Amino acid sequence: MSNPIADLIRQCFTAYETSDRELIEAALAPDFTFSSPVDDNISREAYFERCWPNSAHIEKFELQPILVDGDQAIARYHGTATDGSRFHNVEVFTIASGKVRHVDVYFGSDTAESVDHSEIKATLCAWAAAIGRKDVAATDGYFADNAVNFFIAPPLVADEPLEKNLRGWFATFEGPLSHTLHQLHITGGGSCACAHGLIHLTGTRTDGTAADIWYRLTLALTKTDRAWKIVHAHESVPFLMDGSEKAATHLTP
């Protein structure tokens, strides 16, 4: 016979498999909290900012029988990510008034770093997509308030508010951009990490010319009580060593 608590928990896992935020929002209590080896009793709002982006990288869950005892339940499962990697976790759910009020996730310390890396990857993929949409507010939201940025365009250190910088840059293009991360590599975890890779940017400028450039990207990030935030961004392209000192914008991987 179907158990309503077990069904509610399955709903949460289905939401991750299908990236259906409305489905999981309906399952969580307004005062929902979440804990794991890398998350200390974070709020519902922080959970959606820090953890939910990982749903984009989940392929499927293989749930073992859910053990229900009163208002608590234990779910054990094997998960498969979209890149084919596998993981095995245990989660303890606390239920109140037909909603999930708290979740404790348990995994080994060797997994903690990979969880941080997954969160960072999800954050940076969402940041790259926000630039592609030319979404000023969303892009700005991935940066810490005191972020220091070394962009390709002058000056040496970006000296105006990021929101103003983004509006000016986005205004030089017609329509959306293609802004994709490649060869992303992440190191560190815990409270700080760094990432590097390549960006491929294409689009049509307002003067009708086509932009198609690869450039290098290095990011430093810190983990706040809500999410990973970019505290430093460094973009660059090599310059030609033939005396012309021109930027080598023709290079591709």
Image: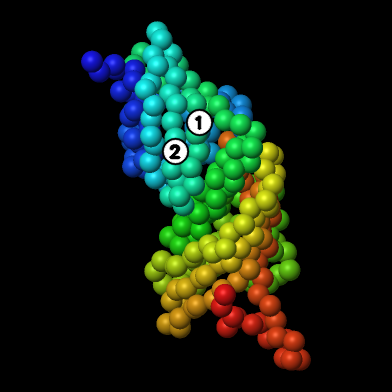
Instruction: Give the colour scheme shown.
Output: rainbow
The quarter of the picture where residue 169 lies is: bottom right
Q: Is residue 235 above or below residue 24?
A: below
Residue at the limit of the structure toward the bottom, as seen here:
243
The quarter of the picture where residue 30 lies is: top left
User: Is there any visible trace of residue 160 in the rendered image?
Assistant: no
Q: CA distance from mark 2 to mark 1?
A: 8 Å
Q: Residue at x 74, y 91 (%)?
A: 242
State which tag comes first along the sequence, 2 or 1: 2
Image quarter where the C terminus lies is: bottom right
In this view of the protein, which residue sits in the foreground, 195 or 243? 195
Q: Residue at x 45, y 73 (%)?
A: 203
User: Is there any visible trace of residue 68 in the rendered image?
Assistant: yes
Q: Residue 78 at what x, y percent from top left? A: 44, 35
Helix, strand, or loop for circle 1?
Answer: strand
Instruction: Confirm or deny contact between disc 2 and disc 1 (CB under 8 A).
Output: yes
Q: Residue 12 at what x, y percent from top left? A: 37, 30
Which residue in the protein does label 1 denote? Answer: 89
Count of numbered circles in the view: 2
Q: Residue 77 at what x, y percent from top left? A: 43, 31
Helix, strand, or loop for circle 2?
Answer: strand
Question: For this view, does 229 lie left or right of residue 132?
Answer: right
Q: Amino acid at mark 2?
A: Gly
Q: Residue at x 39, y 14 (%)?
A: 68
In this view of the protein, which residue sits in the foreground, 228 or 208? 228
Q: Residue at x 41, y 10 (%)?
A: 69
Q: Is residue 63 above or below residue 229?
A: above
Q: Residue 236 at what x, y percent from top left? A: 67, 71
Tell me the number on the disc at residue 79. 2
In this view of the protein, which residue sits in the foreground, 95 or 207? 95
